Amino acid sequence: MVAGLMGVLMVILVGVSTTSINRNREAERRTVATRLAQEGAEWLRAERDRVGWLQLYSKLGSVQKEWCIDKFQDQLDDLSTGSCSSVKDKGGTKIPGDFTRTLISGLDASGEFYRVVFRVDWGSNQQTPVELETSIYKKDD
C-alpha cells in the first residue's frame, strides 16, 4: 500500500515538473519573441528615417502584404514577400530554436501612416505566434 502510494506520488511530481519546465520554456520564447517583434518595429522606423517616407512607400506599397525578415541585418531593399524561411543566422545571439519573423504592412486610408504587425513564429505546435501591432508614421522628407 505504501509502495503504491509512493508510486502515485512520484507520477504526480514528475507530471508537475514536466508542466513547469514546459511553461518556463514557453515563457522564455514568448519573451524573446516580443523582443524580436519590438526590434522589428525599431528597425522599420530606422529604415524610414534612413531612406525617407517616399522610398518606404515605394517598397511597401499601399495594399496589405506580408514581408519576410530573414536576417538581422536586412535593409528595406532586402525584404521579400512570400513564405518565410526559418532564421538560422541569429547575429551571434543566444536565441532558442528557429523562428520566422514576418512584417505585415498596410497603408492607412489617410496615407499618413502604415499599420504594421510584426509576427514571430517558432514554427512548432508548442506556442502560438507573438504579434506586435504598431504604426509607422510619415515623416517629412
Image (cartoon, rainbow, N blue to C red):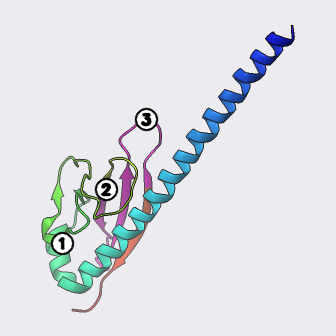
Q: CA distance from mark 2 to mark 1?
A: 14 Å
Q: CA distance from mark 3 to mark 2?
A: 16 Å
Residue 78 x/y as whole percent: 14, 66
Question: In the drawing, what numbered circle is on residue 125?
Answer: 3
Q: Is residue 8 left or right of residue 127?
A: right
Q: Nearer the viewer, residue 74 or 76?
A: 74
Question: In the drawing, what numbered circle is on residue 101?
Answer: 2
Contact, CB < 8 Å: mark 2 with mark 1? no
Around disc 3, counting alpha carbons within 10 Å, would you say few (fewer than 14), some (14 to 19), or many (20 or more)? few
Q: Is residue 118 magenta?
A: yes
Q: Which tag, 3 or 2, sits closer to the chain's start? A: 2
Number of dots carrying numbers: 3
- Which kind of residue does numbered mark 1 sit on? Gln
Q: CA distance from mark 1 to mark 3?
A: 31 Å
Callout 1 secondary element: loop
- Which kind of residue does numbered mark 3 sit on? Asn
Contact, CB < 8 Å: mark 3 with mark 2? no
Residue 134 x/y as whole percent: 42, 69
Residue 110 seen from this side = no
Q: Is residue 90 above or below residue 141?
A: above
Q: Nearer the viewer, residue 126 or 90?
A: 90
Which residue is at a point 66% across and 35% down the rendered structure image?
A: 17
Residue 48 x/y as whole percent: 25, 81
Q: Is residue 62 magenta?
A: no
Q: Quadrant of residue 103?
A: bottom left
Q: Is residue 4 left or right of residue 64?
A: right
- Which kind of residue does numbered mark 2 sit on? Arg
Callout 3 secondary element: loop
Q: Write down the residue under mark 1.
A: 75
Start-end of magenta stretch: 101-130
Which residue is at a point 39% across and 38% down the rendered structure image?
A: 124
